[in-house]
Image (cartoon, rainbow, N blue to C red):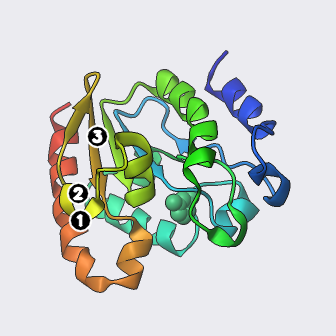
Amino acid sequence: MDLEHLGEKVRNCNNCHLRKTCRGVVFGEGNPLSPIMFIGEAPGQNEDEQGRPFVGKAGQLLDKILSAAGLPRESIYITNIVKCRPPGNRTPTLAEMQICLPWLRRQFAFIRPHFIILLGATATQGILGQDYTIGKCHGQWFTRKGVQFMPTYHPAAILRNANLKKLIWEDFEKISSAVKLV
Ligand code: URA
């Protein structure tokens, strides 16, 4: 089994009801040898249509932030905690995240990144736990089983609130310096 085969398996997944309302499964993409993996919430409409993560407005903003931080999109691996678009772009439920998480764990086992960046509250709380609020823990590294996790703001939040720009940029400066050391 390799990452490509895992992708096929995930695309055929029917483990929860989200597959009934979305167009297709968005597995993830990028450099499978990257030391850094980004995890968002779930595909939105554009991602659902194109079968790729972060290709809408938030994704375009993320691409800009990534290149400014010296981490061009093609150098990283990017996916979501939930692989199917929830109807109307609602936030995935805890149950949906729990059903989908084994796929993310298997993806992780192939990529073995040193760093995982959690984009937004949903990915942060789904992975680190419900007590991890983004306002308090963004920009901090949390070590779990030798892997460094950093929550930061979701680019969609920056589009809604320009005041967050400075904060996300500070977080990305830390990310960029850590990755350069590897
Ligand atoms: N927001 C996410 O969290 N993931 C995507 O893939 C797109 C938008």
Q: Secondary structure at mark 2?
A: loop
C-alpha gap between disc 3 and disc 1: 15 Å
User: Residue at the spot x=32%, y=51% of the render?
Assistant: 71
- Whether residue 165 appears in this view of the structure is yes
User: Of tags 3 and 1, which is closer to the observer?
Assistant: 1
Assess whether mark 1 and mark 2 are in contact (beta carbons under 8 angstroms): yes
| Vertical side of 20 occupied by 8: above or below | above
Quick check: is the Cβ at mark 1 less than 8 Å away from ligand 1?
no
Q: Position of residue 135 (x, y in %)?
A: 23, 65
Callout 1: few (<14), some (14-19), or many (20+) C-alpha neighbours within 10 Å? few
Give the mark nearer the N terminus: 3 vs 1.
Answer: 1
Assess whether mark 1 and mark 3 are in contact (beta carbons under 8 angstroms): no
User: Residue at the spot x=36%, y=44% of the render?
Assistant: 129
Q: Which residue is mark 1?
A: 135
Q: Is residue 21 left or right of residue 51?
A: right
Callout 2: few (<14), some (14-19), or many (20+) C-alpha neighbours within 10 Å? many
| Residue that protrudes farthest toward the top in the picture | 1
Give the mark nearer the N terminus: 3 vs 2.
Answer: 2
Quick check: is the Cβ at mark 3 less than 8 Å away from ligand 1?
no
User: Residue at the spot x=17%, y=41% of the render?
Assistant: 178
Residue 149's disc number:
3
Quarter of the rendering occupied by the C terminus? top left
Q: Position of residue 3 (x, y in %)?
A: 62, 26
Q: Is residue 126 left or right of residue 140?
A: right
Q: Position of residue 123 (x, y in %)?
A: 44, 51
Q: Which residue is mark 2?
A: 138
Classify residue 75 by image quadrant.
top left
Q: Is residue 157 left or right of residue 56?
A: left
Q: Is residue 151 left or right of residue 74?
A: left
Instruction: Give whichever of 175, 160 is nearer the camera.
Output: 160
C-alpha gap between disc 2 and disc 1: 6 Å
Q: Give ligand 1's quarter of the image.
A: bottom right
